Image (spheres, rainbow, N blue to C red):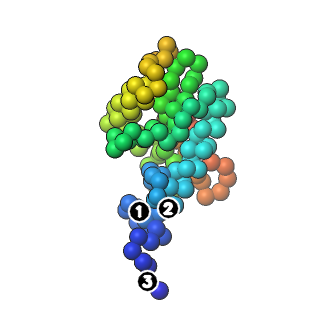
């Protein structure tokens, strides 16, 4: 039995093959993995006393903010990275300086559409989720990465 084009069951790490990755919509197993990680991240932020304002906010082709939240009088733009445990790099390592700059620009766009800067400013946070083969997910929240 041969695999059809676009089959998301191959595990070689290339885009569109179901390997853990960015969780972009329409990417099969990656999309489900990312969505699950974002759900865990939103819960963690709420448990920390934050109010989740929006999830998966898109700005045309510029990009997406995984979670927009309020922490007191500060706006929090949160990038969520989810990985299965294994030989992959830690999820936090996927947030580069370039990615942080892109998130800052997206935060500015979000503020333009939603009424300007909050009194507490804007903070960029990262939530890394690691899903072990067995046991509970490990959720790490790092505040103010950029």
Q: Is residue 92 left or right of residue 96?
A: right
Image coordinates for residue 133, horizontal then vertical, percent: 61, 58
Residue 2 visible, this orientation? yes
Residue at image point 56% right, 47% down: 37
**Does the CB distance between marks 1 and 2 fall below 8 Å?**
yes
Snapshot quadrant of residue 134: bottom right
42 relative to 90 in the view: left or right? right
Q: Residue at x 58, y 40 (%)?
A: 41
Q: Is 100 or 93 nearer to us in this picture? A: 100
Dot 3 and dot 1 residues touching (CB under 8 Å): no
Whether residue 28 is situated above or below residue 107 in the rendered picture: below
* Residue where numbered disc 1 is placed: 16
- Quarter of the figure with residue 116: top left
Helix, strand or loop status at disc 2: loop
Q: Is residue 66 above or below residue 34?
A: above
For residue 2, which numbered disc appears in the image?
A: 3
- Residue shown at 59%/32% (left/top)? 52
């Amino acid at each position: 039995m041969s695999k059809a084009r676009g089959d998301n069951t191959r595990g070689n790490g290339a885009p569109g093959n179901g390997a853990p990755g960015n969780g972009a919509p329409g990417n099969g197993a990656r999309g489900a993995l990312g969505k699950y990680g974002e759900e865990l991240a939103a819960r963690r932020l709420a448990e920390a006393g934050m109010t989740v304002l929006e999830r998966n906010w898109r700005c045309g082709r510029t990009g997406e903010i995984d979670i927009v939240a309020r922490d007191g009088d500060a706006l929090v733009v949160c990038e969520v990275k989810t990985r299965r445990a294994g030989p992959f790099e830690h999820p936090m390592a996927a947030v580069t300086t370039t990615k942080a700059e892109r998130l800052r620009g997206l935060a500015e766009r979000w503020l333009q559409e939603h009424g300007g800067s909050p009194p507490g400013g804007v903070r960029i946070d990262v939530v890394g989720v690691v899903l072990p083969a067995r046991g509970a997910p490990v959720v790490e929240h790092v505040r103010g990465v950029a």
